[in-house]
Image (tube, rainbow, N blue to C red):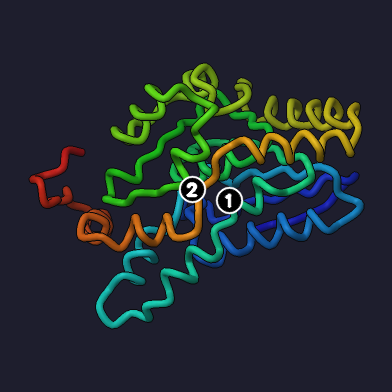
């Protein structure tokens, strides 16, 4: 992960392009700690999160998660993985957070995006909540969707795992706006930074706290409880073995 502060903006860049910026335990921890660092830095008033390569972020490293669930693994490893989830840290950051979505945005990447205050995506970005396809119930996903999208759209996204384009993600309320390309993304983020700085920092903190108080959030235990199930182990195993999962109620459809 890359972290730099310039002109009061903390820029956090997820930097595992070969793995489409999937979140290992380390990368989750690095993101959480980077947001904490920006939070306590009096120079910083805005945090921008983005990715390198074709993806913003594609969720947790599923092979790593599967290893934590194998017989003989340290039973506390899955707790450590969950302890490092950065979503609540991003959500509670008193500084304005902006997700600059440069490409594929799925699972934990989508939760990170929706945990930010403002999100701007390139037109060719795609969005999905695909956890159900690998047998994992991630409680954070519907929590952060609630209030952003209609219940019917939320049900469709989490129950099918379908990917939607950026234009539809904006129309449905998952993200704030869409721009044509990477150059436009940088320009628009910089414009938003200037727009935000036209408002009172104290008022921004107050509004953020009020919004957080009324908006649902996930809870500790959601990931662990939704992963260590027979379907979770089968789905993650199938993903690692590049085959179709066979859940207890029959063969899953791709």
Is residue 205 rendered to the left or right of residue 243?
Answer: right
Vertical relation: 156 (above or below) 70: above
Is residue 23 rendered to the left or right of residue 159?
Answer: right
Is there a contact, CB below 8 Å, between mark 2 and mark 1?
yes
Q: Quadrant of residue 67?
A: bottom left
In the rendered image, residue 127, in percent from the top left (x then y), is placed at: 45, 33
Q: Quadrant of residue 123?
A: top right
In the rendered image, residue 221, in percent from the top left (x then y), is placed at: 44, 60
The residue under the point 21% across, 38% down is: 254
The residue under the point 64% across, 29% down is: 120
The residue under the point 78% across, 46% down is: 94
In the rendered image, residue 198, in percent from the top left (x then y), is placed at: 90, 27
Q: Which mark is residue 108?
A: 2
Neighbourhood count class around disc 1 (C-alpha, 10 Å): few under 14, some 14–19, many 20 upward: many
Is 217 in front, or is 230?
A: 217
Give the mark toward the camera: 2 or 1: 1
Instruction: Say which quadrant the N terminus sits in.
Output: bottom right
The residue carrying mark 1 is 87
Is 79 in front, or is 30?
A: 79
In the rendered image, residue 132, in percent from the top left (x then y), is placed at: 30, 44
Tell which circle, 2 or 1, labels the residue nearer the N-terminal end.
1
Q: Secondary structure at mark 1?
A: helix
Is 122 in front, or is 215?
A: 215
Q: Secondary structure at mark 2?
A: helix
- Distance (Cα) linking label 2 and label 1: 9 Å
Count of all numbered marks drawn on residues in the image: 2
Neighbourhood count class around disc 2 (C-alpha, 10 Å): few under 14, some 14–19, many 20 upward: many
Vertical relation: 239 (above or below) 250: below
Is residue 111 rendered to the left or right of residue 151?
Answer: right
Vertical relation: 90 (above or below) 185: below
């Amino acid at each position: 992960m890359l972290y730099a502060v310039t002109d009061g903006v903390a820029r956090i860049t997820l930097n595992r392009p070969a793995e489409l910026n999937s979140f290992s335990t380390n990368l989750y921890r690095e993101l959480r700690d980077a947001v904490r660092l920006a939070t306590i830095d009096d120079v910083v008033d805005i945090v921008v999160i983005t990715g390198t390569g074709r993806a913003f972020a594609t969720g947790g490293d599923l092979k790593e998660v599967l290893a934590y669930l194998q017989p003989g693994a340290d039973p506390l490893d899955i707790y450590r993985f969950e302890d490092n989830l950065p979503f609540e840290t991003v959500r509670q950051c008193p500084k304005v957070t902006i997700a600059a979505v440069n490409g594929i945005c799925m699972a934990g990447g989508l939760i990170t995006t929706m945990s930010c205050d403002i999100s701007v995506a390139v037109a060719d970005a795609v969005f999905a909540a695909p956890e159900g396809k690998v047998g994992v119930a991630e409680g954070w996903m519907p929590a952060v969707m609630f209030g952003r999208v209609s219940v019917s759209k939320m049900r469709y996204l989490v129950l099918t795992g379908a990917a939607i384009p950026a234009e539809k993600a904006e129309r449905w309320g998952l993200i704030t706006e869409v721009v044509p390309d990477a150059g436009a993304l940088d320009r628009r983020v910089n414009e938003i930074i200037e727009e935000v700085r036209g408002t009172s920092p104290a008022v921004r903190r107050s509004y953020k706290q009020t919004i957080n108080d009324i908006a649902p959030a996930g809870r500790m235990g959601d990931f662990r409880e939704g992963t260590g199930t027979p379907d979770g182990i089968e789905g993650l195993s199938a993903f690692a073995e590049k085959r179709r999962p066979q859940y207890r109620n029959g063969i899953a459809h791709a």
